[in-house]
Image (cartoon, grey):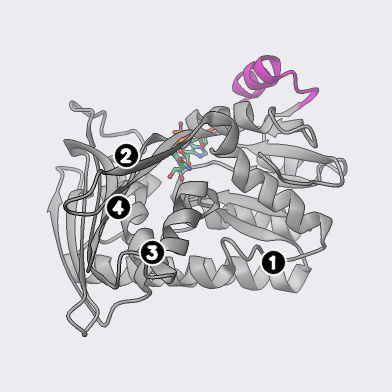
Amino acid sequence: MNINILKTYNWGILAPGNIARKFSTELQQLHNARICAVGSRNAERSKEFADQFGVKRYYDNYEGLASDPDVDIIYIASPHSFHAEHALLCLSHNKPILCEKALALNQSEVEKMIDCAHLNNVFFMEAFFVPHQPSYQRARQMIASAELGKVKYIHGWFGFNKSPYNNSLRLMNPALGGGALLDIGLYPVFDMLYFLGEPEKITAQAEFAETGVDQSISVRFDYGNGVTASIFASFVAACGVGTDIYCEQGILRLRRTSATDQWIEIVRPGDKTTSISWENSACGLKLEAAEAMVCMDDNLLQSSIMPHSMSLSLIKTLDKIRAEAGIVYHGRD
Ligand SMILES: NC(=O)c1ccc[n+]([C@@H]2O[C@H](COP(=O)([O-])OP(=O)(O)OC[C@H]3O[C@@H](n4cnc5c(N)ncnc54)[C@H](OP(=O)(O)O)[C@@H]3O)[C@@H](O)[C@H]2O)c1
């Protein structure tokens, strides 16, 4: 990885769950990043995380972390139904933020978060690892240069099956922002926006779980010029994750099994398929952390790789899909 970060940054970790642990493991690989403090709702969980990652300060609440004067930037990893509340708490203490996806439950919450970051003059970025990855940047260059001709159709999918589910946990619980669209469907949705922009028309259909969240979602994007895209995401179909971009002269396939294991394949009918892969050292969640620090080195309030406009475009599109498919978060629509 060849990213030049000038200053050293003290990170605070808010909500030490699954992804916070993965993120922190990668953060420790960046020489300019130190995990300085952690905040959990529970003292034992906070200490356990602090012991695991060698962190000196641990709080049994989020306010303590948000107001710690030594913390330079906070990574928010609570369930998405709490992102807006936790981001506004940290921003009220003028803390720069890297906040997990889905950035919030709806567009109006995201707008409030971005407005507050502007008002307080602090850096704010959605922790969406995809556009930071070399595979996506290479694919975008190939599409822009029309190496395979124009894009005609994209198919993106993300699915796993961990049944039987515990309905009180994050994935199936509407109070925690559960549902396939906001948890995993937003990845293929992002891909369509990244490669084609916002569509003219969206049609969508959901299959609902007994808790009322969408356990599967199918979406079709129509770009009005013969170009279309389709998206599928599911908690009950073990289909993995991928995106196929069908172009006039061939297919570009994007694949990963995790953030640190990704490759692209370039398929030209009649030719040998070309494959390019990236290893752990060149990809992963650490790239979004590094980008946040590079932006802060330059006193920027947002990243050009994952700008506020992209987060807004994503949540606006997710709102439209939810309206089409009848996916609701009561009182938060
Ligand atoms: N970028 C990625 O690849 C990726 C992957 C997975 C998840 N995510 C995102 O990261 C966020 C967290 O996901 P996760 O899988 O890490 O979830 P998780 O394991 O359930 O952890 C979430 C943490 O949030 C805190 N929390 C605060 N209020 C809570 C509440 N009412 N109920 C439950 N937990 C609460 C808990 O920590 P304390 O109680 O200790 O404070 C909990 O450990 C989600 O928004 C998800 O979409 C991103």
Q: Is residue 39 left or right of residue 144?
A: right
Classify the position of the C terminus by image quarter.
bottom left
Percent of width and height locating residue 25: 61, 26
The residue type indicated by label 3 comes to Arg
> Could you tell me if residue 129 is visible in this image?
no
Crowd band around label 1 with a 10 angstrom C-alpha radius: few (<14), some (14–19), many (20+): many
Q: Examine the residues drawn in magenta and state their main secondary structure.
A: helix
Lower sequence index among marks 1 and 2: 1
- Cα–Cα gap, marks 3 and 1: 21 Å
The residue type indicated by label 2 comes to Leu
Residue bearing mark 1: 117
Lower sequence index among marks 1 and 4: 1
Q: Most extreme residue toward the front, as rendered?
A: 271
The residue type indicated by label 1 comes to Ala
- Cα–Cα gap, marks 3 and 4: 19 Å
Residue bearing mark 2: 171
Q: In this view, does 6 lie to the left or right of 27?
A: right
Residue bearing mark 4: 185
Q: Do the CB atoms of the residues marked 3 and 2 lie less than 8 Å apart?
A: no
Residue 332 numbered tag: 3
Percent of width and height locating residue 29: 68, 28
Q: Which residue sits at x=74%, y=73%?
A: 119
- Cα–Cα gap, marks 1 and 2: 28 Å
- Residue range (magenta): 40-57
Lower sequence index among marks 3 and 4: 4
